[in-house]
Amino acid sequence: MRSIVGDTLRAARLRAHLTQVDVAHLIDIDPAVYSRLERGLRLPSLQNLYLLCTALRATPNELLGYPASLPPEAVSDAKEALLRRVRQLDAHQALALVQLLPDVR
């Protein structure tokens, strides 16, 4: 996990056209500590992960090495599973679901 985070931090930093020192200063840590993060020698704290996401304009999933999007077959399977469950709802449950998801059409 440390090497994955290190690799994704480096890629995000390069995309942002920042140096290691720049990122370290943006999140208020010692540049040597940031260097150890990129080299996979340590993991960022949750607080620093949040700050890194902001500084590098990246998502936590991206920095943790998870894909930005799911494969099409996984999306299709998830939609089918959701539809099966929605069809099993009674009227009160369906109304509650609609109220929880006002922006979904």
Image (spheres, helix red, strand yellow):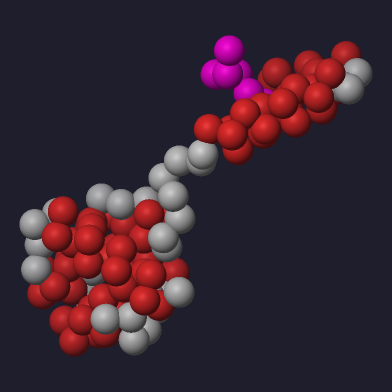
104 within the magenta span: yes
Q: Which residues are magenta?
A: 100-105
Quarter of the image with the N terminus in it: bottom left
Residue 93, image quadrant: top right
In the image, 61 versus 98, the foreground residue is: 61
Q: Give the quadrant of the C terminus.
A: top right
Image height check: is 60 above or below 39? Answer: above
Q: Is residue 46 magenta?
A: no
| Picture mark count | 0
Q: What residue is at 22 percent from the left and 67 percent from the top?
A: 10
Q: In the rendered view, does 46 fall on the left or right side of 30? A: right
Question: In this rendering, would 25 be left or right of 39?
Answer: left
In the displayed structure, 17 sits above or below 9; it is above
Residue 92 higher or lower than 28, as above or below: above
Q: Residue at x 14, y 54 (%)?
A: 16
Q: Residue 13: image x %, image y %?
A: 18, 61
Indicate the position of residue 55 as horizontal and vertical percent values: 23, 58
Q: Is residue 93 left or right of residue 98?
A: right
x and y percentages locating residue 87 in the rendered image: 84, 18
- Name the image quarter holding residue 48: bottom left
| Residue 92 visible to the viewer | no
Residue at the spot 36% in from the left edge and 76% down from the top edge: 3
The answer to whether residue 37 shows anywhere in this view is yes
Quadrant of the image occupied by residue 11: bottom left
Q: Position of residue 51 (x, y in %)?
A: 31, 62
- Name the residue: 53% across, 33% down: 72
Extreme residue toward the front, this view = 73
Principal SS element in the magenta part? Answer: loop
